[in-house]
Amino acid sequence: MKIAQINMVEYGSTGRIMLQISECARKNGNQVITFSKKWRNQRKNIPDHTYFGYFLENACHLLFANIFSFNGSFSHLGTRQLLRKIEKFQPDIIHLHNLHNYCVNLPMLFNYIKKHKVPVVWTLHDCWAFTGQCPCFTMVKCEKWKDGCHHCMQIHSYPSSLLDMTKPMWYLKKKWFTGVNKMIIVTPSDWLANLVKESFLKDYPVHVINNGINLGVFKPTTSSFREKHGIKDDQYLILGVAYSWGKRKGLDVFIELSKRLSREYQIVLVGTDDTIDKQLPEHIITIHRTRSQVELAEIYTAADLFVNPTREDNYPTVNMESLACGTPVLTFNTGGCSEILDETCGSVVECDDIDGMIREIIRICNEKPFSIDACLKRSKRFDMNDRFSEYLHLYDEL
């Protein structure tokens, strides 16, 4: 079988998922080519990967979208280049991922799919596909996406625009994305699957395939992390990991925790930068970037508790990575976060319940109700080889 996968980037969580699915498909005898937008630091060692588009055209796309909205209505030349490469490859399946990054012309792409009746798998990593603009709407508690966006409360958030054109964009997306001859929607969580079933994509079959991680990398890994950073043996290491810290990821929650927890609890945040560091109390330890996933596994292993106070999320891989390293998880009940845990490996509190989170931190660290073995047992269900092989069954079904 010949499979073409498209994601706007080949890095980050969505890019990694695309490449891991491709690797799994190739091991099972399929021919796979992956596509992402051309950018200045593009990698040269990805098997059968093709970059498409033009820097200047994408920059114009970004400018026009930021002023006039209509993200996905430009980049004609780059999209024509992409479609020529797809036409030459003649795939049996087109597998779509994230399409919102100012580099693909959506009507051109979907017109091609409809004209040639190519079966499609579309993995939704957020809610962007069925809104007039935003990829997330949990924090603002918006439900306009159900019957037509307008007067957007997040017009200046990514993908930002000066003009509110969410109403026509919602109708354009509905026109572009519906009417595909054969398409299956995939979501990593039941939470997102239920939202899709309330959107204009509801007529397509929806399958839930959880995200997977590499259990060969994320596993209990001993290190001298605690000694290196001066964390005492009688201190509890409370860990947070994110790659875009802000209110959405709960940065303010960690600041509040640092004020209210005693020095018996040492907070460590991974994925910060100089700007974020200036917002944090001095006694929070920050790690800007890890050298590798192995180093990240060492930090997960060193922690007593992984805390994820995210306010908007789909099915966060950081929760799975922590469990795979034997560290229990405490999270807000948002998106698909709670679906990752069960009563043996972590705890869930309602979003913004900081008092409840503090009580659980103290209880979990002192009573130790979640064993390493229980966390590792739960993590087995996130083996990427098992999860991504489910896509092969979908391909066969299509």
Image (cartoon, rainbow, N blue to C red):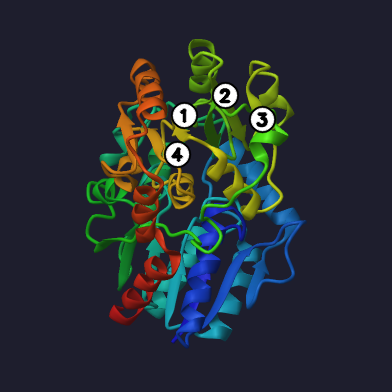
For marks 1 and 4 on the same chain, the one whose residue lies earlier in the sequence: 4
Q: Nearer the viewer, mark 3 or mark 1?
A: 3
Residue 96 is situated, as x and y percent measured from the top left of the image, at 46, 64
Residue type marked 3: Thr
Q: Nearer the viewer, residue 258 or 171?
A: 258
Residue 104 is situated, as x and y percent measured from the top left of the image, at 57, 59
For marks 4 and 3 on the same chain, the one whose residue lies earlier in the sequence: 4
Q: Which residue is mark 1?
A: 154
Q: Which residue is mark 2?
A: 266
Look at the numbered discs 1 and 4 and tell me whether their residues touch, using CB distance below 8 Å: yes
Q: Nearer the viewer, residue 118 or 125?
A: 125
Crowd tier of the residue under label 3, counting other residues whose Cα lies within 10 Å: few below 14, some 14–19, many 20 or above: many
Residue type marked 4: Cys
Residue visible at 67% across and 53% down in the picture: 292
Residue 116, quarter of the rendered image:
bottom left
Look at the numbered discs 2 and 3 and tell me whether their residues touch, using CB distance below 8 Å: no
For marks 2 and 3 on the same chain, the one whose residue lies earlier in the sequence: 2
Identify the secondary structure beneath mark 3: strand
Q: Nearer the viewer, mark 2 or mark 1?
A: 2
Q: Which residue is mark 3?
A: 286
Q: CA distance from mark 2 to mark 1?
A: 35 Å
Q: Which residue is mark 4?
A: 134
**Residue 396 makes an appearance in the image:** yes
